[in-house]
């Protein structure tokens, strides 16, 4: 599975027949994209590359994945990326210091949390109160842990009633759970489906169902870039990819993205994509809605991570569709 890798690639995958029509014969203009994390959860952006949607618009995508310890936003600042996969909550860091964020979030990737809670045994009658007194391996990072704690709050339990275990990044978490550490594990797809495939765990809950719609993950760029023709072209391709992703069977999406997930079982990738399609993580409307942004403010304010409700206009811009 692909998680964090310090790599640079140009898209070589081909689009499913008829998905975007004829590809440009001379895709010479490079657009540089950086992922904070690379997983099937970010399929709206992956499909834009893998499906040839950018090349059909005359753009040649080159993508990177941020190395551990480096923010993708830094690549916007140093000019090594035009657009990055991140989260609107990243802007709160600067705003809490009284600073203007250096980037703006112009399109949503996911309008819901993409993490799942898995147990060692199937539990059709699972309720969140069953976490009391249990050891839960929770994905580290400000947003994943904040959302997990908020899901517990909405489910009527205090996280002091359970033991949250930091077992490291997802691959290390998987190894720890396979070795018998923890009663539950909190992971983004496709890891939960992989554990099911191995017979080690069963998914018992999705945080999307508990937390509800929120501005979870996004595309961000410099304001100056958003004023360019390239930004308009990129956004047009992205919108087409999002529509295709929702209208296309999961198995076909998985085949289109397969070259980007070498080592991932095709059935695992297919079921993960189907999960996110069914949960409503991906929407045809790519703008970050004010209501989803306000929901994210609720979550971070509840966690005590922001001291005021930062203005939507300080964080979000409308997609530059031209």
Image (cartoon, grey):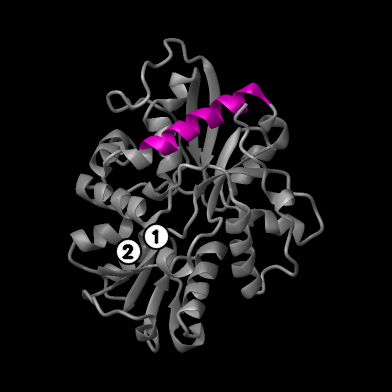
**266 w.r.t. 171: above or below:** above
Q: Which mark is residue 310?
A: none
Q: Residue at x 51, y 43 (%)?
A: 285
The residue lying furthest to the right in this view is 98
Return the x and y of residue 237 as percentages of the image width and height.
49, 28
| Mark 2, secondary structure of its residue | helix
Report the front residue among 272 and 35.
272
Q: Residue at x 17, y 66 (%)?
A: 199
Q: Quadrant of the C terminus?
A: top right
Q: Check whether the beta carbons of the residues at disc 2 and disc 1 lie within 8 A of each other.
A: yes
Q: Is residue 239 magenta?
A: yes
Magenta residues, as a range?
228-244
Q: Which mark is residue 174?
A: 2
Counting every numbered tag in the picture gives 2
Where residue 219 sits, quadrant-wise, is top right
Q: Which mark is residue 170?
A: 1
Left/right of residue 59 with respect to residue 262 in the rendered view: right
Q: Residue at x 62, y 39 (%)?
A: 75
The residue lying furthest to the top in this view is 25
């Amino acid at each position: 599975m692909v998680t964090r890798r310090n790599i640079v690639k140009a898209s070589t995958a081909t689009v499913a027949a008829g998905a975007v029509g004829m590809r440009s014969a001379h895709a010479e203009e490079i657009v540089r994209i950086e992922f904070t994390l690379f997983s099937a959860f970010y399929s709206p952006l992956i499909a834009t590359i893998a499906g040839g949607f950018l090349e059909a618009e005359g753009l040649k995508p080159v993508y990177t994945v941020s190395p551990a310890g480096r923010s993708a936003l830094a690549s916007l600042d140093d000019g090594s990326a035009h657009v990055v996969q991140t989260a609107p909550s990243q802007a709160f860091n600067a705003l809490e210091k009284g600073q203007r964020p250096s980037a703006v979030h112009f399109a949503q990737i996911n309008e819901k949390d993409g993490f799942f809670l898995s147990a060692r045994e199937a539990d059709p009658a699972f309720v969140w109160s069953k976490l009391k007194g249990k050891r839960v391996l929770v994905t580290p990072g400000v947003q994943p842990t904040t959302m997990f704690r908020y899901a517990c709050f909405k489910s009527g339990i205090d996280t002091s009633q359970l033991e949250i275990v930091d077992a490291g990044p997802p691959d290390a978490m998987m190894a720890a759970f396979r070795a018998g550490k923890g009663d539950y594990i909190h992971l983004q797809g496709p890891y939960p489906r992989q554990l099911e495939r191995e017979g080690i765990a069963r998914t018992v809950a999705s945080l999307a169902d508990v937390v509800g719609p929120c501005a979870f993950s996004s595309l961000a760029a410099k304001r100056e870039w958003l004023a360019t023709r390239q930004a308009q072209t990129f956004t047009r391709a992205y919108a087409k990819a999002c529509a295709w992703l929702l209208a296309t069977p999961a198995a076909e999406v998985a085949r289109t993205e397969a070259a980007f997930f070498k080592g991932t079982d095709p059935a695992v990738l297919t079921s993960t994509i189907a999960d996110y399609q069914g949960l409503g993580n991906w929407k045809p409307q790519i703008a970050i809605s004010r209501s989803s942004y306000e929901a994210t403010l609720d979550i971070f304010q509840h966690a005590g991570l922001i001291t005021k409700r930062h203005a939507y206009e300080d964080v979000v811009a409308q997609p530059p569709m031209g």
